[in-house]
Amino acid sequence: MAKTFTSAAFLIAAVAAIPNPNPSTAACTPGKIAQPTMWNLYPSQPDLSQSPFTYLEVQIFESYPQLQQVAVFSGIPPTAKSCTLGWSQSDSTSRTFVVEGSGLIAASPLTGFPAEGEPVSTNSIKPFETAVDDALTPDFTSWDQVAAAWNHTAGAVDCAEEIHLKLEIDARNGDGHVYFEQDAANGLYVSYTC
């Protein structure tokens, strides 16, 4: 009997040691991805591509060139079921956040992204753009004047291991400029449940 028990225990230990061949069934813990990677887009220079960075800055003014951005959120578990775009601001002593005019932003999902090593520019993301009707509209207007910390919800986005959003001032609300230095407590994020 002891030999049978030892053999059974060995078999159970051996099966438990086999790696999961399907990582999509791996455990998922609800969480949040902050500090997306950002790329500037210049509609007046549609092939201009720059290195990525972390701050959020979009603008549309008659006398200045329009500035748009792409935000990329990476590291979302493949088993995430519900994803939400939001943004947070810490108290006014712990942030750099400026809004001039309208802070209404259109955040449109992209269906894909240029391949690694390819330039990210206004023209290179065109094949991945969706209808503006699909855009979420986080409104940053006047929130830079609020001293307290605050969390904001923009709305649901389709879950994926990597989420790509095109950001621009929503011109329906007039000209504007938003500049927001992003860190773990400030800026855009995607939260997810499993």
Image (cartoon, helix red, strand yellow):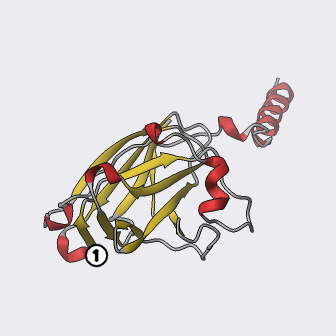
| Apparent side of residue 33 relative to residue 88 in the rendered image (left or right) | right
- Nearest the viewer among 22 and 187 is 187
Quadrant that contains the N terminus: top right
Total marks placed = 1
Judge by depth and name the residue closer to the eye, 46 or 154.
46
At 34% from the left and 68% from the top, the residue drawn is: 62
Image x and y of residue 136, in percent = 39, 43
- Spot occupied by residue 92 in the image (x, y as percentages of width and height): 18, 72
Q: Is residue 56 above or below residue 25?
A: below
Q: Residue tagged by mark 1?
A: 96
Q: Position of residue 112 (x, y in %)?
A: 65, 48
- Which residue is more in the foreground, 180 or 174? 174
174 shown above or below 177: above
**Residue drawn at (45%, 64%) of the image:** 35
Q: Is residue 164 above or below residue 83?
A: below
* Residue positioned 20% across, 66% down in the render: 144
Query: Is 52 displayed left or right of 108 in the figure?
Result: right
- Find residue 11 and report its horizontal and vertical position in percent: 83, 32
Q: Is residue 7 left or right of residue 68?
A: right
Q: Residue at x 86, y 29 (%)?
A: 3
Q: Residues within 10 Å of mark 1 (few under 14, many from 20)?
A: some
Badge 1 element: loop
Give the amino acid type for the residue marked by disc 1 in the picture: Thr
